Image (cartoon, rainbow, N blue to C red):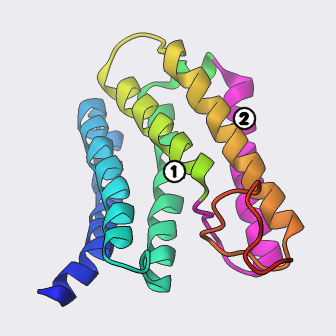
Amino acid sequence: MIRALARLPDLLTAIRLALVPLLWVAALTGRAGTVGWGLLLAGLTDAADGFAARRLGSGGTAFGARFDSLADNLLLPSCAVWLWLLRPELLRAHPVLVLAWVGLFVVSIGAGWIRFRRFGNLHLYSAKVAAVALYAFIVSALLLPGRLDWIIVPAGALGILTETEALLILLTRREVDEHVGSILLPRRDGR
């Protein structure tokens, strides 16, 4: 029983990862509602895996953190493409916001690869807030009609803030702990 509980965060991440190809099929066949509900489930498993890892002790394993990052790094770009396929008018209505957010995401991922030879996903506090806003926006965009400016602008601003913070951390630190929290917090190693 305890071994099964210890694997619970990884199982929740696996569900999120397994949703990606299923949601691609739904998006490519024009089923916006299915993608919206699937992303709601993905968001719930994203929140639940972190909660379960913290509740089970050490905050998870190194494998679990990398597995979570893999799922996040596959899901986020997929969401952008799904939105473009299913609700392109929302992205066209805010080109500067969308390009800044996507551009910073790509630069941040690239900086992590160039500096540390790995694709990382910093588990920043700002990223948690931005993820909630992003999931709320995308699910709303796929399930509700209209322009949804009331949610895309704050979600985009939070995404830009998070990617800027991640980029600053990646460019200013010699080593990066994926659980750094924030650039505003003191470094654990004193560097």
Quarter occupied by residue 102: top right
Of 149 and 158, nearer the camera is: 158
Main SS of the magenta part reads: helix
Magenta stretch contains residue 117: yes
Q: Residue at x 76, y 57 (%)?
A: 183
On the image, the x and y values in percent for residue 114 come to: 81, 74
Residue that mark 2 sits on? 99
Residue shown at 35% from the left, 61% from the top: 51
Which residue matches tag 1? 76
Q: Is residue 178 visible?
A: yes
Residue 46 screen position, x and y as percent:
37, 56
- The image shows residue 96, relative to residue 119, as above or below, that is above
**Count of numbered marks:** 2
The x, y position of residue 56, in whole percent, is: 31, 76
Residue at 48%, 49% (x, y): give it.
78
Could you tell me which residue is drawn at 65 percent across and 20 percent down? 94
- Element assignment for label 2: helix
For the view shown, which residue lies furthest in the left direction?
1
Disc 1 residue type (three-letter): Leu
Viewer-side residue, 133 vs 18: 133
The segment highlighted magenta reads 94-123
* Cα distance between the residues tagged 1 and 2: 14 Å
